[in-house]
Image (cartoon, helix red, strand yellow):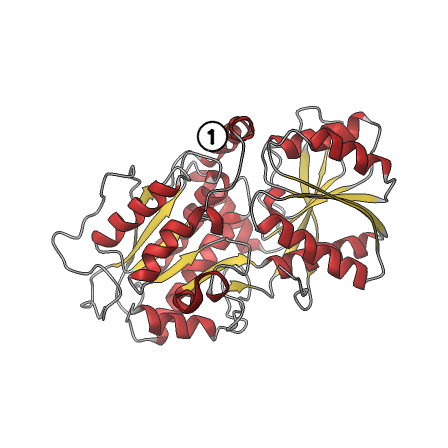
Amino acid sequence: MRSPFSKLGLMILVLAMSVALAACGGGGSSSSSESTEATESTEASGGEENAGGGEKEAASGEPIKIGAAIDESSFMAPTDDPALAGAELEAKKINEEGGVNGREIEFTVGNTSAEPGKNKSVAEELVGNGAEILWVTCDVDVATPAIQVGLAEKMLTVSPCIGTDQMGPKRFGGEGKLAFSFGNVAQDEGAAMAEAAKNQGWKSVAMAVDQSIAYEPNVCEAFKVRFEENGGEVKLEEKFTEGDGTIGSVANKVNGANAEFNVICATVAGDATTFVSSLRGAGNEAPILGPWSLDGTFWLPKNQKEATNIWAVSPASTYGDDPNAEVNKIVKELTAEGKQPVTGAFLLGAGAVDGIKAAIEENEGSTEGEALATSMEAFENLETVSGPVSFSSELHTAFGREYRLIEVTNGKAKFVELVKAGEPAEISG
């Protein structure tokens, strides 16, 4: 399903993304992958019959083909592009060390432009050209047409950064056993937001929750559950849908709640920017906390006084000050390639490649979907460059990592502290 943005909202959103697209370096192609439009094939298999999810015991030396159906030109690009760039860099390092059971990892990329029809057709073409594993965009609603292609072919279907528990059996039933995301599940991320608020001593909150995609209500609900469990008070919770024209009214109500801090769960579209400007314009200088979807500074108001006291949790700091030296090294390497990441998605992409590698090694080089899925479901604190990754039969989206709490002051971001959720919060969604 496509997110229900209005035409006006989508126009605002695309304009807001233009800065991010430039910062990401455009597409995600590199020496290990090649970007395509929806109807163009790349790195075709030369007639090799390897589409679908049957036995895939490729001969030693043949590449492990990962087909990436992602958005390189629309509103998901600020997460999809860094995730792919990080994945390609990690794949390059693995290949230089001899690959996975003697096989190199090879990405083939198709641009879906976040359109349902293209998600489906690009995925079908990637599978037809020999992809053994399908890689999809970072929102489950947008990615569903592509996910369904991979599951129908009984392929392991992976997203680097979908943030809901719907990437798995919850949405896709029995076939969903083959679907996994290396993004942080909303129940975990929202709980981490609440722990961050507790660490900062914030005790009362007013909330604004975008209903456009499943992730935002889920992450805000998880935050609310854990915040109240920690003794916090939710003074107000207002709902809106990106582009529906109500964000000004929502901001006014949030401002009137006089909470110690404010939370907005939304995408980096125009409404989030307007929310910040509206509160600051009304003289409300309280902290504004958001989930990883509000990572980065590119979406914030240009007025630096407005872009102050803004906080977000992220899987990584892109600002050269991450507490993990390896993360800072990856940022430098991507920047040198002209792919400076604007969000922490780059680290999730790299972690997803580590997870794929571990599952293939456990199956002695096989890429058969059911076998890989069984291995992944059993991951418990699997060590990856993105931190330890755990899955379960219920949660096929990762949990258990440490988050980075990022603070923006006068438009400049910095790492503050590491935050961990503890147990994921229980939500109704």
409 or 149: nearer the eye?
Answer: 149
- The answer, for residue 6, to whether it is visible in the render is yes
Residue at the spot 38% in from the left edge and 66% down from the top edge = 175
332 or 346: nearer the eye?
Answer: 346
Residue at the spot 69% in from the left edge and 59% down from the top edge = 191
Residue 12 found in image quarter:
top right
Residue at the spot 47% in from the left edge and 32% down from the top edge = 21
**Mark 1 residue type:** Ala
117 or 92: nearer the eye?
Answer: 117
x then y, percent, for residue 322: 61, 50
Q: Which residue is mark 1?
A: 22
Residue 402 found in image quarter:
bottom right
Q: Is residue 124 left or right of residue 238?
A: left
> Compared to 113, does 200 lie above or below?
below
Q: Is residue 398 left or right of residue 417?
A: left
x then y, percent, for residue 283: 84, 28
- The answer, for residue 195, to whether it is visible in the render is no
Counting other residues with Cα less than 10 Å from the Cα at mark 1, is it few (<14), some (14-19), or many (20 or more)? some
x then y, percent, for residue 147: 38, 55
Q: Residue furthest right?
A: 258
Residue at the spot 55% in from the left edge and 26% down from the top edge = 8
**Secondary structure state at the residue bearing disc 1:** helix
x then y, percent, for residue 290: 68, 45
Q: Is residue 97 left or right of residue 303?
A: left
328 or 248: nearer the eye?
Answer: 248
Q: Is residue 228 left or right of residue 265?
A: right
